[in-house]
Image (cartoon, rainbow, N blue to C red):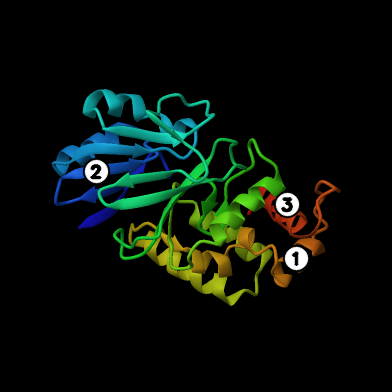
Amino acid sequence: MLSIVPIPAFSDNYIWCVTDRNSGKALVVDPGQAAPVADYLRANDLTLDSILITHHHPDHVGGVAELEETFQPQAIYGPADSPFQGCSVTLTEGDQVSWQGLTFDVYTVPGHTLDHIAYHTRQTDIGNAPALFCGDTLFACGCGRLFEGHPAQMRESLDKLRRLPASTRVYCAHEYTLANLRFSRDLLPDDEGLQHFEIACKQKRDRGEPTLPTTLKDEASLNPFLRWDDDAVATAVSARDIPVDGELQGADRVFAQVRKAKDTFRG
């Protein structure tokens, strides 16, 4: 029996913790802070067995060294060719991670950073659905800023994720949903799906609940960063005459315009 909870960190990070209650072992994803993880493990009498890292940014790896020293996990998995050198097992496209009967397929998803990877399992042991740990590549109704990559590269990475099973639950690393929805609703004010989703997410936040996880099915239909082939999105960004690299065409250009619009949005 596996369970999953978000451990809040900083102001808006989630450190996802997967627990095997039978063994008392835990796996955590992107522990940017050690203290919240240590407190949760001790309060629930859990053993930190493994850590998954998606990319090198400090709010995703800042707690790794302390957790390693305190709990001595069996493995710390993370991207190869990364500025972060604290992993015991490095991974790239096509590799797999096995943990407590689960198998995660590893995908390289550069764009936000060049070393970014994602972990996906088609098994339904976590939350009765396939699970995706995607760090800062894909958010609910958003995607990560392009700090190191370029638009075509990021769109290709997002396309990899969009092609995964629609029932996949998306466990991203930040509670950015309402901010992303303010932009999405401004871009697509007549989109009824976004209207209803925003209401539901506001209700969750009012109750003190996370808006995550979402599903890839919802993201494909709602998230403007995944809708580069949707006429409504293409029309919306075209109407704003958003300047982007002139060599970008088709889907890459639409995506780049959405990303540029979000980067400059002040709503």
Question: Which x, y percent locates residue 191?
Answer: 62, 74
Q: Residue furthest right?
A: 246
Q: Secondary structure at mark 2?
A: strand
Q: Is residue 96 left or right of residue 26?
A: right
Which is more toward the observer, 245 or 87?
Answer: 87
- Residue kind at label 3, given as amino acid type: Ala
Question: Which x, y percent locates residue 155?
Answer: 66, 52
Mark 3–mark 2 Cα distance, whole angstroms, equals 38 Å
Q: Is residue 150 among the parts visible in the rendering? A: yes
Question: Which x, y percent locates residue 107?
Answer: 51, 47
Which image quadrant is residue 254 in? bottom right
Q: Give the position of the C terminus as an image quadrant.
A: bottom right
Q: Are marks 3 and 2 in contact (CB under 8 Å)?
A: no
Mark 1–mark 2 Cα distance, whole angstroms, equals 43 Å
Q: Which mark is residue 168?
A: none
Are there few (<14), some (14-19), or many (20+) residues within 10 Å of tag 3?
many
- Residue kind at label 1, given as amino acid type: Ala
Q: Is residue 15 among the parts visible in the rendering? A: no
Mark 2 = which residue?
26
Residue occupying image coordinates x 68% and y 51%: 259
Which is more toward the observer, 229 or 205?
Answer: 229
Mark 1 = which residue?
234
Q: Which mark is residue 256?
A: 3
Are there few (<14), some (14-19), or many (20+) residues within 10 Å of tag 1?
many
Q: Nearer the viewer, mark 1 or mark 2?
A: 2
Q: Are marks 1 and 2 in contact (CB under 8 Å)?
A: no
Q: Earlier in the sequence, mark 3 or mark 2?
A: 2
Mark 1–mark 3 Cα distance, whole angstroms, equals 11 Å
